[in-house]
């Protein structure tokens, strides 16, 4: 890419140390191009957004757009993944993975509306986010130039970034004491770096910022009742709420009881392993609620299919292929299954655990009359003999053939 061709850049801006340094760096290295800061409000801490426009302007941006994407994030990104049951490598509820394509999509839309000719992001050359941003750019606006400063500049540490900002007289609240890398939205908070870089170090209190430590959570359990309609939580404890509102309420309850903490070493798409502490309080409760209803309403093959869909969805979302036809086809299959996901669950929240203790559904395939260990008049146990004989027929034929072979050998 010829730097002279870049006149106007839309930068995915967080207000953190990296993107604050990127603004002046872009202007220096790309012919004093115009830099427009784009901020996605996806439910991060309100304090992270306070004064962010002024900070962007002080860093050299010509303007700063803050776009509220919270409802869109929950409705169009969180729920399709939640309904599929996707868990990356069995643990990670994909909070950052789901958010990046939405942020990149909104960034592209802004760039096109402003006639910008380039997009920029602050993802490093080591991580997954660079892939998630740039696969979205490629899918939606391949004609725009892409600038990834971490793959170009020679700034390699917090010290270097702080020195760069000082050199360009740009104020910052960042410091060397902020050793953790964090990503937050309405679904989760992730924490990486610091002591977590050594997997032998146990995570300390500084590694958790949202949820109460389970051992310090209330000594009495709390029950929460959820109503689900076609795969959507519509009611929490008797109150009808929007998807965003229900998630926010469950976040509060889950965080209070220490729900949703995960400390894992995962395989990044780029090939290395990394360790992270993830906090997903409301999402963990929601996941348990969905699985509770599924157990009632999905037959064996449908449940197995949903599990396979979840596994595939986890990888495709983690890898940043949100706008691929494959992801859309997975979502269509999930939506089909969700037509039966209706019912009510009661979940007990206690000391870091969310446990479904009651569940019911008008679509339930569970029949007490058939399942009882007591006397019944609906099931003839003698019928099982014929079923077992047919089910084991191939094994029976194989054994007969093996017996014939042994007889010939003798």
Image (cartoon, grey):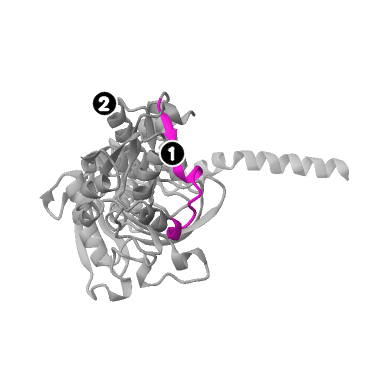
Q: Looking at the image, do the residues carrying marks 1 and 2 touch, with CB atoms under 8 Å apart?
A: no
Nearer the observer, 190 or 212: 190
Q: In this view, does 141 lie above or below 44?
A: above
Q: Position of residue 174 (x, y in %)?
A: 33, 60
Quadrant for the C terminus in the image: top right
Q: In this view, does 141 lie above or below 208?
A: above
Magenta range is: 144-160
Q: Position of residue 33 (x, y in %)?
A: 35, 34
Label 1 residue SS: helix
C-alpha separation, residue under disc 1 versus residue under disc 2: 24 Å
Label 2 residue SS: helix
Nearer the observer, 101 or 333: 101
User: Magenta span has 150?
Assistant: yes
Q: Which mark is residue 77?
A: none
The first of marks 1 and 2 along the sequence is 1
Q: Residue 29 carries which label?
A: 1
Q: Where is residue 227 in the image (x, y as percent from the top left)?
A: 19, 48
Q: Does residue 319 show up?
A: no
Q: Where is residue 153 in the image (x, y as percent from the top left)?
A: 49, 45
Q: Residue 113 carries which label?
A: 2
Nearer the observer, 253 or 46: 46
For label 1, count other residues whose C-alpha is less than 10 Å away and answer few (under 14), some (14-19) or many (20+). few
């Amino acid at each position: 890419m010829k730097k002279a061709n870049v006149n106007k850049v839309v930068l995915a801006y967080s207000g953190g140390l990296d993107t604050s340094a990127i603004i002046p760096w872009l202007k220096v290295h790309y012919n004093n191009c115009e830099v427009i800061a784009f901020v996605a409000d996806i439910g991060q801490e309100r304090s992270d957004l306070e004064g962010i426009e002024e900070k962007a302007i002080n860093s050299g941006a010509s303007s700063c757009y803050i776009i509220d994407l919270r409802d869109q994030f929950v409705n169009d990104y969180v729920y399709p993944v939640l309904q599929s049951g996707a868990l990356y490598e069995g643990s990670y509820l994909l909070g950052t993975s789901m958010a990046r394509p939405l942020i990149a999509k909104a960034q592209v839309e802004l760039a096109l509306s402003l006639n910008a000719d380039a997009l920029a992001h602050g993802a490093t050359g080591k991580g997954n986010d660079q892939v998630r941003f740039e696969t979205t750019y490629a899918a939606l606006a391949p004609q725009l130039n892409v600038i990834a400063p971490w793959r170009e500049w020679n700034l390699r540490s917090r010290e270097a970034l702080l020195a760069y900002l000082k050199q360009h007289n740009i104020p910052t609240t960042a410091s060397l004491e902020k050793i953790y890398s964090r990503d937050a939205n309405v679904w989760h908070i992730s924490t990486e770096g610091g002591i977590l870089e050594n997997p032998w170090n146990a995570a300390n209190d500084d590694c958790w910022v949202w949820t109460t430590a389970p051992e310090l959570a209330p000594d009495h359990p709390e029950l929460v009742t959820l109503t689900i309609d076609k795969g959507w939580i519509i009611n929490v404890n008797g109150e009808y709420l929007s998807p965003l509102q229900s998630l926010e309420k469950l976040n509060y309850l889950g965080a209070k009881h220490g729900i949703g903490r995960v400390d894992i070493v995962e395989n990044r798409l780029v090939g290395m392993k990394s360790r992270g502490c993830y906090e997903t309080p409301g999402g963990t409760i929601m996941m348990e609620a969905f699985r509770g209803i599924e157990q009632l309403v999905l037959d064996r093959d449908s449940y197995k299919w949903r599990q396979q869909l979840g596994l595939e969805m986890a990888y495709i979302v983690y890898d940043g292929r949100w706008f691929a036809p494959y992801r859309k086809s997975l979502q269509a299959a999930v939506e089909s299954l969700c037509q039966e996901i209706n019912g009510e669950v009661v979940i007990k929240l206690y000391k870091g655990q969310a446990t479904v203790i009651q569940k019911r559904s008008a679509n339930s395939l569970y029949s007490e009359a058939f399942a009882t260990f007591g006397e019944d008049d609906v099931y003839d146990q003698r019928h099982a003999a014929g079923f077992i004989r047919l089910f084991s027929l191939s094994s029976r034929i194989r054994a007969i053939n093996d017996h014939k072979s042994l007889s010939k050998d003798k």
